[in-house]
Amino acid sequence: MTGRLRPVALIARREFAARVRGRAFVFGTLAVLVLLGAYAAVLATITAGEDTARVGVTGPATVLAGPLQRAAPTEGVTLTVIPQPDVAAGEAAVRAGDLDALVGGEPARPRVFVESEPPADLERVLDDATTVVARDAFLTGRGVAPGALDAALAESGPVFVAVEPPDPQAGPRLGLGLAGAFLLFFSIQSYGAMVAQGVVEEKASRVVEIVLSSVRPWQLLLGKVLGLGAVGLLQLVILGGAGLAVAGVAGVLVVGPGLVTTLVSVVVWYLLGFALYATVFAAAGSLVSRQEDTQSVLSPVTITVLLGFVVGFNLLTSDPRGTGITVLSLLPPFSPLFMPARVALGVAPVGQVVLAFALTIAFTGVVLALGGRIYANSVLRTGARVSLREALGRARS
Amino acid sequence: MLEIDGISKRFGSTVALDGMTFTVRPGELYGFVGANGAGKTTTMRIALGVLAADAGEVRLDDRPLDASSRRRIGYMPEERGLYPRMAVGTQLRYLAELRGRSAAEARAATERWTERLGIADRRADEVQRLSLGNQQRVQLAAALVADPDVLVLDEPFSGLDPMAVDVMSEVLRERRDAGAPVVFSSHQLELVERLCDRVGIVRAGRLVAEGTVAELREASATEVVVDAPRAATGWADVLPGVAAVRTTAEGTVLTLADASDATLGTVLDAARRTGPVHEFRRRRPTLAEIYRDAVADHHPDARPRPGAAA
């Protein structure tokens, strides 16, 4: 590392060390991790308690045990059938909450004792089971073997041919895409704002004059963006990794090639998006000299990003294949937020990804040139806020 | 050798510098004095590349300054600035490394200068926890820690306690003796008079007088103090060769238009005619007086005075 890049590396290292050791980073990351953990715990409890119905059978209705167990999977219910010695014991078990229902009496028209309202899915399972019992009795009475009818019916049913076959992983993919978009938005907003604050801090404390008597403005800007970008990336990896681990444990995510593509695209788009926004934030920050004024120059940028994010997030959840989100994901300032989500959903054609990438790189180039110029022109101006026109004026030689 | 050659700079309609020219030789301590707004800070900022000049050139050892040669300059800006939340030691090492020192050199220099400036026990503290005086010391350490070949210090003495002023003076002399060109600005003219090998007086963006303090004295109008207790008021008003007369606690002070023996003789004779003469001597103006004279001349196109050595 020599010459012009050593100062850049030194500056990046300082920014990285100052932030990673800072309270905001450590506690912020921990807080999000704790929230994620709590969410996962809640999710796991709900999943564990879900759909396990305990049904007691007694008397003649005991013959329903078989049909009930066969009907349960077709309704998506996990069912345990527990034979009861008599009606009184079964009803006591329902009252005590040990059973969800007690089935007794005539198999085709049983009496079902429940605490208050039968769960809809359990009702459907019971419906199916009583229908089977009634049908089998009817068929047997007419000399037809119910098994033969079942075999004939098993072969029937339509065969669907879809233009776009549904993705069995659609749910997790949407979750992954939305989580990616949110993490990118969060990282770019918070670390971009940190770049601006850092620029203003250097201006406010005047240390920038000493630093800029040693290095060029572009070196300082680049070092800052790289250092803080690395901190943001570190947090993104920690949070994203924790999120994926949680999703894996909860069983809502299956590791596959789609996942790898998504992760790579999130990281690549983060890097590009951060370079883009950090430059804008740095240029905006360089216009003011006091921390109190930072918000006024940042709001136009943050509000634009926030609006784009809200609109895009809604489009993404309601219609991930729609024209709206397609256009939004191709517009450079929003591509980094939404293209990875569309990649995660598997709805982004390669051509569009390449186009968005090229557009964003071109746009970032323009932003770097303009932002670098604004920064170089304003970073040493103290006092009143520098107007954009002045900042874009004559460049510093 | 640091050469400031014909630097001009405008801020909008304000002319900040108008052909500023001076040279600081190796092993020379150069004092840069002038009123607020005269252009001292702008000159230094341009020399450090923090501002761009509209015209003119700054050279170090006959080569125009560029990014790498600027790193050889130790700089103390007028607006003091350090990272408030960074520890003293880390900060000094960082600034030394930014100026091209290796990590080991930076560490050694940080230890050396913090010890020398009496802030060694504060190395682990954040700068914002230090007193203002100690922050000033850190600021000086920041200028010195990269082992610079040249020192450019803007108001290095402002805000220092007397002990720190002594340390600072000692350090400046030491660097000068080591052969470095050293230039600093100050409003404390007695200090400048005592410390500096040469002085440049700046007004309205250009140098109006320059030279050693002795040379500046030579160039300024000769004054004679006459203590003739019985002389009547106005005794010296019409003497040939006398430009101005004022009465002070010391006696009558005559400013001579020319310092020839003839004029001096005439003045002495006139004084003796009034009665006894207790004192008759050339008066040595202080730098403060020379400075006041120089900046009081309000000719818009005043040139450095003839006789003021360049």
Image (tube, coloured by chain):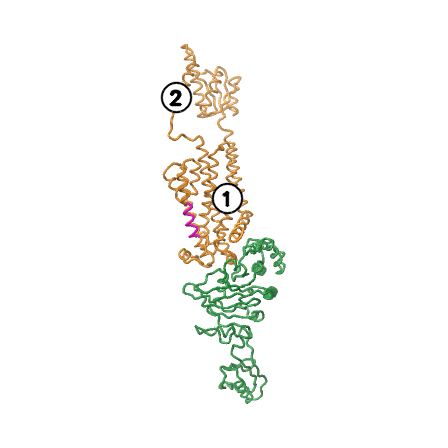
Let me know if marks 2 and 1 both belong to one chain.
yes
Amino acid type at mark 1:
Leu
* Secondary structure of the residue carrying numbered label 1: helix
* Secondary structure of the residue carrying numbered label 2: loop
User: Which region is colored magenta?
Assistant: A360-371
Residue A186 sits above or below residue B184 on the image: above
What label sits on residue A233 in the rendered view?
1
Which residue is most to the front?
B62
Q: Which residue matches tag 2?
A: A157
Image position, residue A42 (x, y; %):
51, 34
What label sits on residue A26 in the rendered view?
none
Front residue of this view, candidates A240 and A332: A332
In terms of secondary structure, what is the magenta stretch mainly? Answer: helix
Residue A348 in magenta stretch: no
Residue A304 falls left or right of residue B254: left
Image position, residue A251 (x, y; %):
50, 31
The chain ID associated with circle 1 is A
Amino acid type at mark 2:
Gly
The chain whose colour is orange is A
How packed is label 1: few (under 14 Cα within 10 Å), some, or many (20 or more)? Answer: many
How packed is label 2: few (under 14 Cα within 10 Å), some, or many (20 or more)? Answer: few
